[in-house]
Image: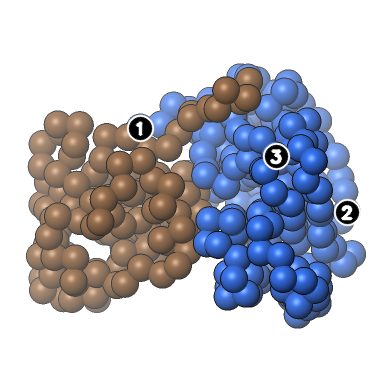
Chain colours: A blue, B brown
Amino acid sequence: MAVEYEARVARIVEHAPDTRSLFLSGPRIAFRPGQFISCLLPVGGETLIRPYSLASSPEEDDLEICLNLVPGGRASPYLLTLPVGAQVRFTGPWGTFVLDRAPEAEAVFIADGTGIAPIRPMLRRALATATRHPLRLLYGAFHNEHVPSARLRDEVARRWVDGDADRARRFFICGVGAIVPALRDLLRGAGYERRAVQYEKW
Amino acid sequence: MARIRIIFENGDPERVIEFDPARAPFQHDGKPGSILDVLLGHGIHLEHACGGNCACTTCHVIVKGGGKALSESDESEEDLLDKAPGLTPTSRLGCQAVVEDPDAEIVVVIPRYTINQIVSEHGG
């Protein structure tokens, strides 16, 4: 069984209606930029296990998770009503969508909506360890909705598939639903090496 | 009835589950009828930090027999398995490998380690 930790909601920041960050204070855990914690949530008499990417950097004291209301979901309504001071149990860190240092190639980060959460500590680490290669971020947010998939896909195709023949770039993609494997398939199909296209699909 | 024999690399006693795949899901995490679903629904713990949504490698199992009775892996599962510690040619993610044959005879090994608390030299 994984080690369980207990944290307290130290601060809540509302980004938009139904989208907020919870700052969890308690155990200082070591993690790699891009990893997530797995919250154990008491809902309806059972324990729900839900992963939340860490939007904070390993160097910060509190753990930040960013979430929005999932229509029909059971975990997000619970977390979005937690007050400051509430206890949250979790395990982790988990996950292999990570960046320990800036790649030795141009790095492109692509995030859709709250998919920016794991990208943020990755970008900070990439900036702190930057090489001569550029770092790029393509971030899509349309009010509180996800960017229409076709638009994000077209933008990626225009810039990094049709735009030039360079296939040495590294990609880090995070978002919700089918857009993530769609971007993966687009890039790999265009000639980027499989391991050069890293992603996390929620 | 389908059968899964479970061997624990940590030395815990073996277990055998007999079940009817048509009765899936047996609980709420992982694909219905997946190895994760069957094990959890029969009281056997298998780590699944992402909630059984094909987003981590903690439900990694090694299929020692009966693999043909399982659904085929897709690219997302293969990408994650690529990073699983102790990867073998018959490794699967428990949350994705669905038992499709009603008379399946499957043997799985639960590895001792999963990717957890692995920190790089920069991890602080």
x and y, in percent, of residue A65 in the image: 70, 40
Residue density around tag 2, few if under 14, some if 14–19, many if 20 or more, within 10 Å:
few
Residue sitting at x 32%, y 34%: B113
The total of numbered circles placed on residues is: 3
Q: Earlier in the sequence, mark 2 or mark 3?
A: 2
Q: Is residue B8 left or right of residue A182?
A: left
Give the residue type that dot 2 points to: Ala
The answer to which of marks 2 and 1 sits earlier in the sequence is 1
Secondary structure category for the residue under label 3: loop
What's under tag 3, amino acid-wise?
Ala
The quarter of the picture where the N terminus of chain A appears is: top left
Task: Give SS at disc 2.
Answer: strand
Marks 3 and 1, the one that precedes in the sequence: 1
In the picture provided, is B54 more to the left or to the right than A146?
left
Q: Which residue is mark 3?
A: A102
Q: Position of residue B9 (x, y in %)?
A: 19, 36
Mark 1 residue element: loop
Q: Nearer the viewer, residue B14 or B56?
A: B56
The residue under label 1 is A1
Few, some or many residues within 10 Å of mark 1 (<14, 14–19, 20+): few
Marks 2, 1 in one chain: yes
Which residue sits at x=57%, y=23%?
B121
Q: Is residue B31 visible?
A: yes
For the residues marked 3 and 1, what is the alpha-carbon distance in whole angstroms? 33 Å
Chain on which label 1 sits: A
What subunit carries mark 3? A
**Residue B110 screen position, x and y as percent:** 24, 44
